[in-house]
Amino acid sequence: MLRVPRSRGALSGVILVLLGLWGGLAALLGPYFHFAFAPDKAWSFTAGRVWLELLPACALLVGGLILLVSANRATAAAGAWIAALGGAWFVVGGPLSALWSAPDRLGAPVGGTTRQVVEQIALLYGVGAVALFFAAVALGRLAVVGVKDARLAEREAPYVEEAPTVEAPRPVREDRPGPIQATQPLPRRTAPPPMTPPEQPMPRPAEHTVPRAPEPTDRRVAGGSADDTGTFRRPGEDTGTFRRPGEGV
């Protein structure tokens, strides 16, 4: 919310700059037109003229320029306060100068009675009063957060880069594996365990055939023994080699 558009104090800044230029140049160039305070001499830097006319004019000029170019609420408010102090010194500086010694005071206004009244208003009191008014207007406008300021802050909020936050390291428990801290030694790299060949399946034992008991229809093959029970064949079974039809015996 510290950012404000430059137009917020532009009008007050322009008027304060013009008032500062008028107060300073009129004090130095006014004697050319017999419109000044004594001594009636142009470009004369007396103590009274410097402290009561040139110094507050510079304050109005500086404060108005700050209001005119600043886009920061606090900086613009500081410029308005500087201009307000310069305007107040234009008003109260003349009466306070009566307490000073005679050489340091501002001289009497030149000319007749009417001209003297106009010179006091145009060169001191009137300039200070107008400067105080516009400085107060600028301070009031800067003290209020308007709808335009809120919308400007909402538009600029997504583009504000957030500062990276550093997370505190989590404590490592002894009974749970955790991240390796700077104080812990690095783990040693070990070679992978050797690969063992897969186990070969054990050969299954040969199945033992149970001898078949002879049946009445079996016949004994010639050349076989009586104890050889595996030589019995059923009628019609061929004990020779299998041959295809048409092949010789």
Image (spheres, rainbow, N blue to C red):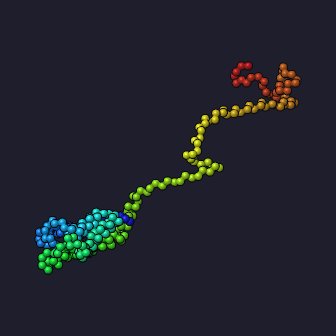
The residue depicted at 86 percent of the width and 30 percent of the height is 214
Which of the image's four quarters has the C terminus? Answer: top right
For residue 7, which quarter of the picture?
bottom left
Q: Nearer the viewer, residue 238 or 142?
A: 142
**206 left or right, relative to 108:** right
**220 left or right, relative to 204:** right
For residue 148, which quarter of the picture?
bottom left
For residue 223, which quarter of the picture?
top right
Q: Nearer the viewer, residue 20 or 98?
A: 98
**Where 171 falls versus 123 (above or below)?**
above
Q: Nearer the viewer, residue 237 or 122?
A: 122
In the image, residue 69 lies at what x, y percent? 28, 63
In the image, residue 231 lies at what x, y percent? 83, 25
The residue depicted at 61 percent of the width and 48 percent of the height is 177
Q: Nearer the viewer, residue 149 or 2?
A: 2
The residue depicted at 28 percent of the width and 66 percent of the height is 63
Which of the image's four quarters has the N terminus? Answer: bottom left
The residue depicted at 57 percent of the width and 41 percent of the height is 186
**Residue 109 appears in the picture as rendered:** yes
**Where 210 falls versus 135 (above or below)?**
above
